[in-house]
Image (cartoon, rainbow, N blue to C red):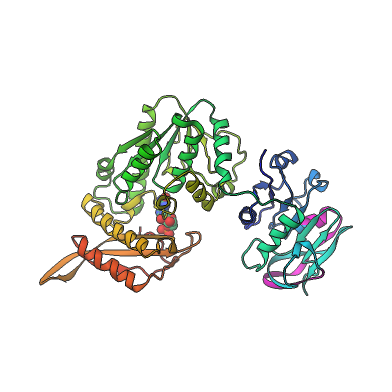
Amino acid sequence: MTSASIPVLDFGSQTAQLIVRRVRELGVYSELLPHDATEASVHALNPRGIILSGGPASVYELGAPGMAEWLRDVDLPVLGICYGMQLQSYALGGVVQGADWREYGPATIATLEDHPLFADLPREQSVWMSHGDRIERLPPGFRPLAQNASTPFAAVGNDDRCWYGVQFHPEVVHTIHGRDILRNFLYNICDCEGDWRPAHFVAQAVERVRERVGDERVLCALSGGVDSAVAALIVHRAIGDRLTCVFVDNGLLRLGEAEQVIDTFREHFHIPLVAVNAAEEFLSALEDVSDPERKRKIIGEKFIRIFEREACRLEDVAFLAQGTLYPDVIESKAPDRSKGITIKTHHNVGGLPADMQMTLVEPLRYMFKDEVRAAGLELGLPESWVWRHPFPGPGLAVRVIGAVTWERLEKLRRADAIFMEELRVADLYRATQQAFAVLLPVQSVGVMGDGRTYADTIALRAVSTEDYMTADWTRLPYDLLARISSRIVNEVPGVNRVVYDISSKPPATIEWE
Ligand code: XMP
């Protein structure tokens, strides 16, 4: 039996995904379902309650997402958030109207009584509002639970049905006690046990892969990143040696990375692994190419051709495993999770052949990144791998600025390895979300011993970011930077200068190319 859950029905809010994350963080399984999900699909998740997300529409508009017939009569607790709350009122006979103002940003609300939804919370609290419409009259059986001057129905409830609504967004961090309110809903109203852990994904995902793949064989492209590694380990646990991994060493990886992939998968996990050393092929294709986008295109195409070649050698492979994560699934609005999809180009593995007739199997399609990491640890993936910073598909080719040669790649690999080693020794590797070295096409004058040098420059980049869309440069300690700089100029021949990149994104990007 699926563990108990709180499904979230998606009415289009930007933060609907965040509600799912919060519920899972509180120890209860959750999935985001379309607002018009069928009763059967909700019940398949063994729900203890349902959350209705916010959304951009107005309930009284033509074409606004409505409430399914079955949901009106459902015998489960329901929490409506923002639009979800307005819809709840509207569908049950209340009145919702556009206000002539929008309430957007922080607001203070006051609760009107002691209520399990607000148990152990201060009477006045700061919440995040984002709405234009508001409830003017409550439906029968509902009463106000919290208010403020502009929103008389900031929270409402009907205890007989265990239906509640909040006009604000408890899922965002700006609602100071938002997490507590959600916890109260899960535990005080829905009687959840809170026994769900990200590690449960492993057993569930293994089972799903087994069902989906049957007796067929599966291919998985390993990139060296955490997602493809965890996807491969789950598939291996499900079907054993009917999984074959393909790992393409394109010569653009970091120091020791190819060896680690091969050792870990072949020697440690005993997973059949085809390792293709294609460094020369990639480097000759990149000869004299300096333009970053051309580099990307050449590398993407080369990867496809090599992967195709290797896949052809393995006969009777019906499935391709990919490490697609839940946010990608939600964002691409994948219609039906049970249907097979014929491969199209996909960024996860650097683009795959459009005409390859394999069916996708995506063991991570219900997981967020932090849950993939937890699953990786559960499956015995080394910590250093689980917590590795993201690495771009085109690899070091976009960190050797200008022309890519083996000699320049080696220089960069050594500098980068020193940077990473020192970050780990200082216990600051996880204090930054992405750190790396860049080899600049700039030579400058230096002095070493009694001699003049004219040598290369290494730039160090470390960023702090939540989503990699915006980023700030990480304030690494000066002493650490000094040590890294000194080691690089002493240990990497041909480098006499190290600079630290103090640009934020925007206007810069994280990578230099
Ligand atoms: P930028 O440089 O755009 O990077 O600020 C944001 C994040 O994306 C990664 N990145 C890539 N990943 N293929 C990838 O798989 C690429 O071509 C690519 N370019 C940038 C980058 O490392 C950072 O995490």
Up-down relation of residue 170 to residue 107 (above or below): above
Q: Is residue 242 visible?
A: yes
The quadrant in which residue 37 appears is top right
The quadrant in which residue 47 appears is top right
Query: Left or right of 36: which side holds 160?
Result: right
Q: Nearer the viewer, residue 196 or 317?
A: 196
Most extreme residue toward the right is 140
Q: What percent of the width, then of the height, locates residue 153?
A: 80, 66
Is 304 contained in the magenta span? Answer: no
Q: What percent of the width, then of the height, locates residue 473?
A: 41, 68
Figure quadrant of the C terminus: bottom left
The quadrant in which residue 491 appears is bottom left
Figure quadrant of the N terminus: top right
Residue at image position (36%, 49%) is 394
The image quadrant where one finds ligand 1 is bottom left
Q: What percent of the width, then of the height, locates residue 338?
A: 61, 35
Q: What percent of the width, then of the height, locates residue 391?
A: 39, 52
Q: Which residues are magenta?
A: 87-113
Is 111 contained in the magenta span? Answer: yes
Query: Left or right of 443: which side holds 337?
Result: right
Q: Is residue 304 visible?
A: no
Up-down relation of residue 58 to residue 281 (above or below): below
Up-down relation of residue 301 to residue 397 (above or below): above
Q: Main secondary structure of the magenta part?
A: strand
Query: Left or right of 26: which side holds 71?
Result: right
Residue at image position (43%, 37%) is 220
Residue at image position (39%, 63%) is 427
